[in-house]
Amino acid sequence: MTATAWKESWRPARLEEVLPGGLVKCHLSPRNCTIQEGKNGFCGVRGNRGGRLVTMNYGKSVHITEETIETEAVNHFSPGERILSLGNIGCMLNCSYCHNWKTSQSRFVEDKDVFQYTSEGIVKFALRHGIRCLSWTYNDPVVWHEFVRDTSRLAHEAGLINLYKSAFFISPEAIDELIPHIDIFSVSVKSIDPVYYRKYTSGWLQPVLDGCKQVLRSGRHLEVSNLMITDISDGEEAAKSIADWHLRELNSTVPLHFVRFHPDYKMRDTIRTPIPRLERAREIAMEMGVEHVYLGNVYNTPFTNTYCGGCNELLVHRYGLNATTPGLDAAGHCSKCGKDAHFRLMPKSSHSQTVTDLPADRDYVRSLDWHGDIRAAHVQIHNSGDRPEKLYYRRRFADSDSQLWRVLTLDGGERYRFAVAQSAPNELGFEVASVSKVKTHLHELYDRAHFPTIAVEDAHAETDVSPLPMYPGRQLLARAASGGCAAD
């Protein structure tokens, strides 16, 4: 895996229509972009080269990262399951509040943040580290269609499963190509208001709704999330609308997540969604008959847990991105009364190695304290040596100093990235320890969909309001492009 000059290469793309006059049409998304020779489509990563449709991001990814399945707004498929999150560059949408704008909007992508992978390499990486689920996520996997399809097929052959986290602005033909290879779909339905979609996402609504129904008909596992934007889509009528559609067009057992927004990209002049509005949305949806309704990007709330619909037993306890299953049996039913809780479970698995004491040769220790809304982080590691090395990390709690160290073994030259999220109210933060040749960078993480590209040591400002990197604004970008400078 090496950093790549991502614009310099491309390969043939699927779902093309060759037109007269050297034009080509892309049928990957509802846009059906008609593209001239040498130009790119809306997404910025698919274009016309020699009169044929090409993809410029095949195998090109931000750093792959170990997380948990709850990161993807998936609560009813093997809670707590470790996943390998894979995000790429580009997007079929341009949402005004995008939490991943630095990679979703191709004009902002920097070569230093892009790495080259192969399908075979990703599958081998997951197997070596005991990860059973590949998660196609972050910016949006729609624009990575060829690589997702190829790698997911290899993953299935190796006994792995695939998760697809998407805003789902995608054509029916492309969904048909995905369904044989994807086990879990987590779809972000931004709103049930067509005007909202046009104004805030640059897309349109109906293809997203139709795509959800197409997945449901296929029998694949489906969960739906709704990002509630402060003073725009966080009112009671918005909650009623999405719950009504959910019940009419899907069914009551499909989990629904109301997700907290943070100010970002072009929508920084606002505040995080007030939690009481999220709680009211959940109350409305449950009163209307949706059986499993959750809050996302919220800590210290019982509304991330799963309770039995029959006897109210606690089935799954969640805090942040961490989950335990005290009340579920092996079939996904309540272990107390036997009611079906609509879970799909994988066999139990444990791959982690832990030790009580830190080896004496660990000469490099770093720590991060949780603060404000910073309740999670990515730890990026590079073993710069030529032989295997171990990295150790543990959580720090207010009332204990004897937590076990988890051990992660890296091959010579290997890079790794993993998420740590606060697991309890009394958890203060975490620390990592290694030898000096194992380089570590800490990236503060806001919410489960946010992929931070700036490490703590490279940041020049601290904020609990909007995560780094901050969108510089149109005025600054325009002046920088013309050789000037300004503050927006």
Image (cartoon, rainbow, N blue to C red):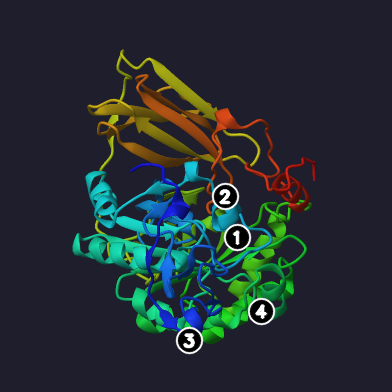
> Residue visible at 53% across and 52% down?
448
> In the displayed structure, does residue 486 sit left or right of residue 247?
right
Could you say whether the residue bearing mark 1 is in a helix, strand or loop? strand
In primary-sequence order, the first of circles 4 and 3 is: 3
In primary-sequence order, the first of circles 4 and 2 is: 4
Q: Amino acid at mark 1?
A: Val
Determine crowd level at label 1: few under 14, some 14-19, many 20+ residues with C-alpha closer than 10 A. many
Q: Nearer the viewer, mark 4 or mark 2?
A: 2
Q: Amino acid at mark 2?
A: Asp
Give the quadrant of the N terminus. Answer: top left
Q: Is residue 111 above or below residue 392?
A: below
In primary-sequence order, the first of circles 1 and 2 is: 1
> In the displayed structure, does residue 161 sit left or right of residue 428?
left
Measure how far apart labels 4 and 3 are at the Cα level: 44 Å
> Residue visible at 40% across and 46% down?
115
Q: Nearer the viewer, mark 1 or mark 3?
A: 3
Could you say whether the residue bearing mark 3 is in a helix, strand or loop? helix
Measure how far apart labels 4 and 2 are at the Cα level: 25 Å
Measure how far apart labels 1 and 2 are at the Cα level: 10 Å
Q: Is residue 440 above or below residue 87?
A: above
Q: Amino acid at mark 4?
A: Ser
> Residue visible at 40% across and 53% down?
60
Could you say whether the residue bearing mark 2 is in a helix, strand or loop? loop
Q: Is there CB contact under 8 Å for labels 4 and 2?
A: no
Q: Where does the image place residue 132, in percent across and percent down from the top left? A: 28, 54
Residue under label 4: 241
Residue under label 2: 447
Determine crowd level at label 2: few under 14, some 14-19, many 20+ residues with C-alpha closer than 10 A. many
Q: Is residue 427 above or below residue 204?
A: above
Could you say whether the residue bearing mark 4 is in a helix, strand or loop? helix
Residue under label 3: 20
In primary-sequence order, the first of circles 2 and 3 is: 3
